[in-house]
Image (cartoon, grey):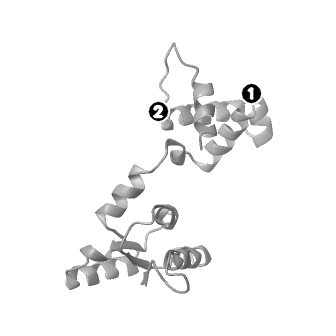
Amino acid sequence: MLDVRLPPTQTDEGLRAAIAVRRERPGFPVMVLSQYVEHLYARELLASGEGSVGYLLKNRVSDVAEFVEGLRRVVAGGTVLDPEVVATVMARQQPVDRLSAREREVLALMAEGRSNAAIAERLVVTEKAVAKHINSIFTKLDLPLGSDDHRRVRAVLTWLRL
């Protein structure tokens, strides 16, 4: 259990320490307490989806029994998140954040102007696999099939806006 703000700068050392520990030991139970939601680090802390993570806001931790139960849940492999943490992380999620690592690779190659065949050759997959990735990209970026739009161009423009 740690606070977001730790010495020496009293800024975000606690969250950075939690993330570092989880990189070294995936699944290691971590409970973070804070007065505010640090969006980027919260998202990184939760990114693995492995559980054993808690992120609570201090001003809402008033029931000791509930807090102890939350700690037990985290130690047992569960996740305990303050609703404000969830809302903040979800509100700031960009459509591109929904893409898998492979879909990001495909989209980056699309942004270079590569054809499906060239992408398939570069990634050592079939053109059919590339087409499936591209369709998934269109879906995740909310780019429906329409006669007025070129979805491939719109997907690349979304990628370039990052």
What residue is rendered at 56% in x and 31% in y?
A: 135
Which residue is under mark 1? 115
| Mark 2 Cα shell of 10 Å, populated few (<14), some (14-19), many (≥20) | few
The percent coordinates of residue 16 (x first, y second) are 55, 75
Classify 86 as above or below 30: above
Q: Are marks 2 and 1 in contact (CB under 8 Å)?
A: no
Asked whether, in this view, residue 125 is left or right of residue 38, the answer is right
Quadrant holding the N terminus: bottom left
| Mark 1 Cα shell of 10 Å, populated few (<14), some (14-19), many (≥20) | few
Q: Is residue 43 visible?
A: yes
The percent coordinates of residue 72 (x first, y second) are 33, 82
Label 2 is placed on what type of residue? Asp
Along the viewing direction, whichever of 97 and 28 lies nearer the viewer: 97
Classify 9 as above or below 117: below
What residue is rendered at 71% in x and 30% in y?
A: 127
Name the quadrant containing residue 128: top right
Which residue is under mark 2? 142
Mark 2 or mark 1: which is in front?
2
Quadrant holding the C terminus: top right
